[in-house]
Image: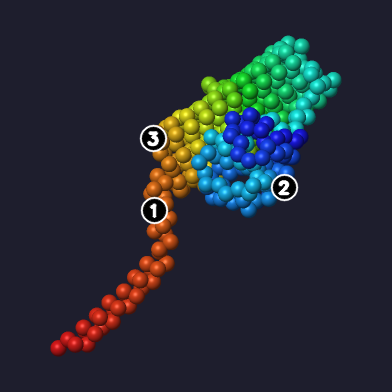
Amino acid sequence: MSFTASQVAQWCAARLDGPDQEFSSLDALDLAVPGQLTFAGVASYAKGIAESKASGAIVTEGLPVQRRPDQSILWAPNADLAVAQVLERIAPPLPVPDLGVHPTAVVDPTATLGRDVRIGPHVVVQAGAAIGDRCVLMAGVFIGAQTALGPDCFLWPNVTVRERCRLGQRVILHPGVVIGADGFGYRFSRDGDGPGRHVKIPQIGTVEIGDDCELGANTTVDRGKFAATRLGKGSKLDNLVQIGHNVNLGRHSILVAHTAIGGSTQTGDYLVMGGASVVSDHLTLGTGVQIAAMSGVAQDAPDGVKLAGTPAVTAREAFADLKARHHLPRLIDTVRDLQQRIAKLESAAENHLP
């Protein structure tokens, strides 16, 4: 799909500076070729627009830009958000199933289907489930008994949503997501013969996912032991994220790939977890907590704190400790040198004793 600079200006409320030319697509600053549009949201990228082969760029207002006469500059309040608006316009249509129920799908007669649903091949919808208006269930999706999906949900292939779970409006679940698997609950028992065994604790709770949440491929959210595991409205989880049973995740949280939150932990809104970071179970994290990648949080955290390291401490402490570690090799050499000097001084003093 081709589009013009003036169209882009309308789509993202940008101001056009330069020729109103036509573009074929978008690409990154260093990869764009003539006929393509690029973007710059920070000064270091904006300075390179003139050297780029791109025919135009979306740029955040106020950044320093040098452009060639043949380049179009589209000034936007926020270049990254403007790019998202453009991509929404030019994205190719998704390969969704036809309206209605595919012949190979199995939908229980007691299930409720909303208007204009699209249910693809080999989907299973069990008894008493409710699928909201305009929901899309791609091939191989499983919806358990008494589970309810709000309007406009989009479930990619091989998503599993087990029994009695609740999804809000406009929830997106990417391939392989599992909602409502049993929480990891066992207790060790020495009853009977032998050294003992792990006894499974039944997990009879549910999962509730708020409006506008998006979960990446192969992410899992376990059901609660008694009540519900809850994901707050607008939260975005990357691929391979694990949410333990009875977690309450605050609204608009961002969890990057390979993160995990242990069971019964409560978090405030706007939590940010860097890749491969972990939060232990039964903790309370305040609003706006930020956790650096590869960190392990083992204690409660107040509002707005930035954590890093394992066990996690404040980012200031963690980076100060890291800086100190870099000086250790030189410090060891210094101590060794001082020890040798002291030994020489002591030897000299002993030789001068009367």
- Nearer-N-terminus badge (3/1): 3
Relative horizontal placement of residue 60, taking residue 20 as reference (left or right) = left
Query: Residue 6: where, in percent of width, then height?
Result: 66, 33
Quarter location, residue 101: top right
33 in relation to 345, above or below: above
Query: Could you say where residue 132 lies in the image, as x and y percent from the top left?
Result: 68, 16
Which residue carries the number 3 mark?
302
> Mark 1 sits on what residue?
320
**Foreground residue among 75 and 227:** 75
99 to the left or right of 233:
right
Residue 354 vertical position relative to residue 143 in the rendered view, above or below: below
- Residue shown at the point (44%, 36%) measured from the top left: 289
The quarter of the image holding the C terminus is bottom left
- What residue did someone put label 2 on? 34
Front-most of residues 130 and 244: 130
Q: CA distance from mark 3 to mark 1?
A: 21 Å
Can you give x and y, in whole percent of width and height, for residue 25 in the image? 72, 40
User: Which structural element holds mark 3?
Assistant: loop
Residue type at numbered disc 2:
Pro
Query: Which one is earlier in the sequence, the residue at label 2 or at label 3?
Result: 2
